[in-house]
Every structure is written in C-alpha cells, then in structure tokens.
Amino acid sequence: KWDTVAHHLAFIACSVLACSYRMLPFAFCWLITGEASTPFLNLRWFLINTGNGDTAAMNITNITFALSFFAARVLLYGIGLVDLLIHREIILSSPQIPLLVSQSLLVLIVAGYLLNLMWMWNIVNMAMGKGRNNKKKAS
C-alpha cells in the first residue's frame, strides 16, 4: 500500500540525512522505538495467513499490537515530537547543517507522526468493527 511504502521511504531518507550530518540522535532513539509494535503486526499477519485469524491468539495479538502501537507510535512519538519542535530553532540554526536538510528532516518527522495517527485511527476503527474485514463480511 502507498502509506507503507511512503513510511519506509521517508524513514530511509531521514536516516540517511540524520546520519550524514550526525544530527538528531535523541529523536532517532524514540523514532526507532516505534518499531516495538512491528513484531505484533507481523504475528498478526502470520496468524491470518495460516488460517488462525479467528482464534484467541489472534485476539491477544490484536490487543497487544494496538496497545504497543499506541504507546510507541502515538504517545512516545508525540512526546518526542513536541520536544523536537520546542527545540527546532537550535536545529534550524546550526551552521554545520544546511537549512534545507534540517527543514526536510522536521517535515518528514511531522509527516511520519501524522501517518501514525492515520494508522491508529484505522486500528481503532477495525477494533470497533468498522474496518475493511468487517465490510467484506457484510457484503
């Protein structure tokens, strides 16, 4: 899907820029922590594709995925983003880093958070029975 591809391309771009200019190590600590939900997403995919999508294991996995996603990609990312934006003038005024690089990183990190909010909205809708799988069952 377009959003997953955009997420990975943006994260690669952020990583290359930040590493090349040795900037934002604290931000990348909380950004990479967002991947804490990924094992549960992968387990969810595995359960669905092995015919175990209607099991207790799937229910536990869904809950664990949603909670870890919210904790890491909404709360932690949000707190880190607020801190980053509070200190943005320090980042934008660094003479060693081209302004376009600093601005690009800030824009990509904010966009990443917005994407996570969109995904969280989708997770909540699926949990409430408004997701894609339930629409297919109703047809």
Image: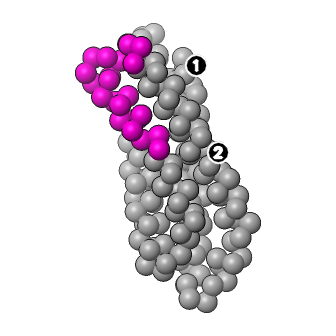
Q: Which region shows up in magenta?
A: 36-57
Q: Secondary structure at mark 1?
A: loop
In the displayed structure, 133 sits above or below 46; it is: above
- 136 part of magenta stretch: no
- In the picture, the quarter occupied by the C terminus is top left
* Residue in the foreground of this view, choosing between 107 and 21: 21
Q: Give the residue at x 65% y 51%.
A: 78
Q: Secondary structure at mark 2?
A: helix
Q: Give the residue at x 59% y 38%.
A: 70
At label 1, counting other C-alpha atoms closer than 10 Å, the crowd grade (few under 14, some 14-19, many 20 or more) is few
Q: Could you say where residue 50 lies in the image, as x and y percent from the top left?
A: 25, 21
Mark drawn on residue 42: none
Q: Nearer the viewer, mark 2 or mark 1?
A: 2
Main SS of residues in magenta: helix
Q: Is residue 53 left or right of residue 108?
A: left
Q: Could you say where residue 61 lies in the image, as x and y percent from the top left?
A: 44, 25
Mark drawn on residue 75: 2
Q: Could you say where residue 68 lies in the image, as x and y percent from the top left?
A: 53, 37
The quadrant where residue 38 appears: top left
Give the mark, 2 or 1, whose residue is nearer the N terminus. 2
Q: Amino acid at mark 1?
A: Met
Q: Is residue 70 left or right of residue 33?
A: right
Q: Amino acid at mark 2?
A: Leu
Q: Are marks 2 and 1 in contact (CB under 8 Å)?
A: no
Q: Give the residue at x 65% y 58%.
A: 81
In the displayed structure, 15 sits above or below 35; it is: below
Q: Give the residue at x 49% y 78%.
A: 22
| Whether residue 122 can be seen here | no
Residue that badge 1 annotates:
128
